[in-house]
Image (cartoon, rainbow, N blue to C red):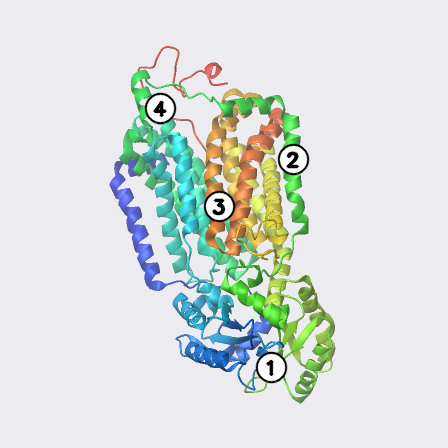
């Protein structure tokens, strides 16, 4: 690390230019290539996956995604001549737009079911040429704009469907708010404008490069449509934090009398190594998603890991070059004046951090019990976690997709927003005869609102039936209907034939996905926890430290999921925050959140326990090690946590329910991790365990390779130091801060 720092300091302009060229080059390539994300979460081999494969193979015209144009007349009928002429003209205009393959409206004998019983609501289905992830945003916006031009007095027009949501304009308010709050916190922590801007500049360059790289990654593998925002959320949080740790160490070196170059080199060689280790743990946790072997999650894992790698790289290369450029301005004017007048001063832990550390030392059992109760109470809602479909009925009430959803539910019943599709492969006359009786059987099934006629493809070997449930897509009763169709209704229909039928649709697909996730979750958690514990075992030569870290990480995950369940599933404040109504939690959220939260939790564990371990190696006094480690790292950890929480909460403003879930879960986890676990429960437990914290069997100690997270500082140069004061590195142990 020292060699990397020396090169970047010696060639500071080259280091900065290399990063700017990388950012510009990747961004330009991404601009020409364009996005190629996917929102297809179907898993091959599942029941719903097989239904989708049958339809794609048998019906080429069903390959594109759809949007729904819904119109409503509160005081008249959609059959009125003026309304019919307006909407017919509008639908014809939509059908002529680029990218639109077909428009099926209600005005004709072929679609009598597209007008509600009271005659006040109607809808048309717009079929695009491509899947939602491949539809250019401009094409989707053109459809929305053309449809909404028809709205006027007495006629409400709304649009629903995944394709419309894809075409919504991107909102960058969340990123701006997060960065602004981070800048304020950094300025308050440093008192120097130049120093406070460096972590932000470093994070923006690395995250911008990673964002453009994720766009390119989507052209070579499946990348979920939320991956870029997730990567940006993680990258801004950890990027600013990693740079904060290094700048803090650099400023400490300047105050101790080191030159700008020596202080920057020392910061990278010490804290920079801890940053690399912390980043490695985040990447290990993220790449743990690969063990699930789910295509779109692989893309999420690699994209997020790419972001973390680039933020770590920028922190140990770009940041020291920038520190060299600003020189002594990394310190505030007051600090520079004091350094010039009094010379290098000792770094003593004072203020609230030192008092809090002493308080925890005096009452570890009481405070440990309080922290445990807080975490347990917050984790209770996790026991009621329900994975399922959060559809457009959960969008904010002002969104056109939510209003279209509500109009359809009111006019046609909630099930019309998420119909089920039964796809069948036929092989002969017996199969055809058995399938002909299926609609009658389905109409007599409990929970079914309506059944469409059978639709056959041109060759007659593939067919499908659309089933509209009585309940909404996210309802537990709809999931029960899917199970009932698969287990009880369909098997007898084709029992004596070779007819193969599969239930697909939105609810069926999400249920299948949730079942796979739940089945593989123990393996995934075991791999992530095991690898994290192994890294900590190598770093701290202790059995207790990694075991405590594993328990704390599980506690942070459980408590943060409790917050997510309360806000999104139970709806506590979700409408107030503009996050829509209550609904189930996305099936893929647990996997992604476990990996991200485990990685982020390791960061604070590394920085906190790393300082304690350093003190333990010097003194062999556990009480002192815990007290000094908490006192000297508490302030910077809390500042880093405030920044990360601000960045994560700012993403709630994105307007995207999934990203808002990530933001609230991560913010809750970091807040609990920094202010309850790392500054309260961890030191309390370490005080109670005593020297057992650092115990490792001698045989295992000999077998394990040795790595050093954060080696000692450079020695303080000869300088005039006021009487009674010494530099940190040169101070005897007995005189060090207590």
- Residue assigned mark 4: 255
Sequence order check, earlier mark of 2 and 4: 4
Q: Which numbered disc, 3 or 4, marks the residue that appears first in the sequence?
A: 4
| Label 1: element kind | strand
Secondary structure of the residue carrying tag 2 is helix
Q: Is residue 254 above or below residue 221?
A: above
Q: CA distance from mark 1 to mark 4?
A: 76 Å
Mark 3 vs 2: CB contact within 8 A: no
**Closer to the camera, 216 or 270?**
216
From mark 3 to mark 2, how far is it between C-alphas? Answer: 25 Å
Badge 3 or badge 2: first in the primary sequence: 2
The image shows residue 359, relative to residue 375, as above or below, that is above
Q: Which mark is residue 372?
A: 2
- Whichever of callouts 1 and 2 sits on the residue coming sooner in the sequence is 2
Query: What's the distance in space between the residues labelled 2 and 4, CA to CA?
Result: 39 Å
Q: What number is the disc on residue 648? A: 3
| Real-space CA distance between mark 1 and mark 2, rounded to the nearest whole angstrom | 57 Å
Q: Which residue is mark 1?
A: 463
From this view, report whether residue 119 is shown above or below residue 5: below
């Amino acid at each position: 690390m020292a060699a990397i720092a020396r090169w970047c300091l010696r060639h500071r302009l080259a280091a900065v230019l290399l990063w700017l060229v990388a950012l510009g080059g990747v961004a330009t390539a991404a601009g020409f290539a364009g996005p190629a994300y996917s929102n297809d979460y179907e898993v091959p081999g599942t029941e719903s996956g097989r239904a989708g494969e049958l339809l794609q193979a048998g019906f080429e015209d069903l390959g594109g995604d759809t949007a729904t144009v819904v119109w409503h007349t509160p005081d008249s009928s959609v059959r009125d001549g003026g309304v019919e002429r307006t909407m017919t003209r509008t639908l014809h205009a939509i059908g002529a737009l680029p990218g639109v393959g077909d428009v099926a409206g209600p005005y004709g004998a072929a679609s009598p079911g597209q007008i509600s019983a009271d005659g006040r609501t109607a809808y048309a289905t717009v079929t695009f040429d491509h899947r939602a992830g491949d539809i250019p945003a401009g094409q989707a916006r053109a459809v929305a704009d053309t449809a909404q031009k028809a709205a006027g007095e007495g006629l409400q027009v709304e649009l629903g469907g995944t394709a419309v949501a894809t075409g919504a304009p991107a909102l960058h308010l969340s990123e701006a708010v997060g960065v602004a709050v981070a800048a304020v916190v950094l300025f308050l922590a440093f008192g120097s404008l130049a120093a406070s801007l460096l972590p932000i500049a470093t994070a923006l360059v690395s995250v911008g490069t990673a964002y453009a790289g994720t766009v390119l990654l989507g052209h070579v593998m499946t990348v979920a449509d939320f991956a870029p925002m997730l990567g940006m959320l993680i990258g801004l949080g950890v990027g600013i934090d990693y740079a904060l740790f290094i700048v803090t160490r650099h400023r400490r070196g300047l105050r101790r009398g080191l030159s700008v170059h020596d202080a920057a080199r020392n910061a990278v060689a010490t804290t920079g190594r801890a940053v690399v280790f912390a980043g490695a743990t985040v990447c290990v946790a993220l790449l743990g998603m690969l063990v699930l072997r789910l295509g779109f999650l692989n893309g999420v894992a690699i994209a997020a890991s790419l972001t973390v790698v680039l933020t770590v790289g920028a922190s140990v290369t770009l940041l020291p070059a920038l520190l060299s450029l600003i020189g002594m301005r990394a310190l505030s004017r007051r600090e520079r004046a004091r350094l010039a007048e009094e010379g290098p001063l000792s770094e003593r832990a004072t203020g609230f951090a030192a008092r809090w550390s002493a308080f925890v030392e005096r009452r570890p059992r009481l405070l440990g019990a309080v922290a445990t109760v807080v975490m347990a109470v917050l984790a209770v809602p996790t026991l009621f976690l329900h994975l399922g479909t959060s559809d457009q009925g959960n969008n904010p009430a002002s969104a056109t997709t939510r209003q279209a959803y509500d109009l359809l539910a009111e006019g046609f019943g909630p099930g019309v927003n998420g119909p089920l599709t039964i796809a069948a492969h036929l092989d002969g006359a017996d199969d055809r005869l058995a399938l002909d009786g299926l609609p009658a059987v389905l109409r007599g099934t409990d929970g079914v609102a309506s059944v469409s006629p059978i639709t056959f493809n041109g060759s007659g070997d593939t067919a499908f039936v659309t089933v509209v449930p009585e309940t909404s897509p996210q309802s537990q009763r709809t999931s029960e209907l899917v199970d009932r169709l698969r287990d009880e209704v369909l098997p007898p229909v084709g029992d004596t034939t070779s007819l193969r039928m599969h239930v697909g649709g939105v609810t069926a697909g999400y249920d299948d996905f949730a079942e796979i996730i739940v089945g593989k979750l123990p393996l995934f958690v075991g791999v992530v926890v095991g690898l994290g514990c192994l890294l900590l075992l190598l770093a701290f030569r202790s059995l207790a430290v990694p075991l405590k870290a594993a328990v704390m990480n599980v506690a942070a995950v459980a408590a943060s999921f409790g917050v997510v369940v309360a806000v999104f599933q139970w709806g506590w404040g979700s409408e107030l925050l503009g996050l829509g109504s209550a609904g189930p939690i996305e099936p893929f959220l647990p996997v992604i959140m476990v990996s991200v939260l485990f990685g982020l939790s390791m960061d604070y564990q590394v920085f906190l326990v790393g300082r304690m371990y350093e003190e333990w190696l010097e003194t062999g006094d556990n009480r002192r090690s815990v007290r000094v480690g908490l006192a000297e790292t508490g302030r910077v950890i809390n500042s880093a946590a405030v920044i990360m929480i601000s960045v994560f909460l700012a993403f709630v403003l994105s307007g995207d329910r999934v990203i808002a879930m990530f933001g609230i879960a991560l913010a809750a986890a970091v807040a609990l991790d920094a202010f309850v676990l790392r500054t309260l429960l961890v030191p309390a437990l370490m005080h109670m365990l005593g020297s057992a914290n650092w115990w490792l069997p001698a045989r295992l100690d000999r077998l394990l390779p040795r790595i050093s997270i954060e080696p000692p500082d450079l020695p303080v140069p000869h300088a005039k130091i006021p009487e009674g004061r010494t530099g940190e590195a040169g101070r005897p142990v007995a005189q060090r801060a207590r």
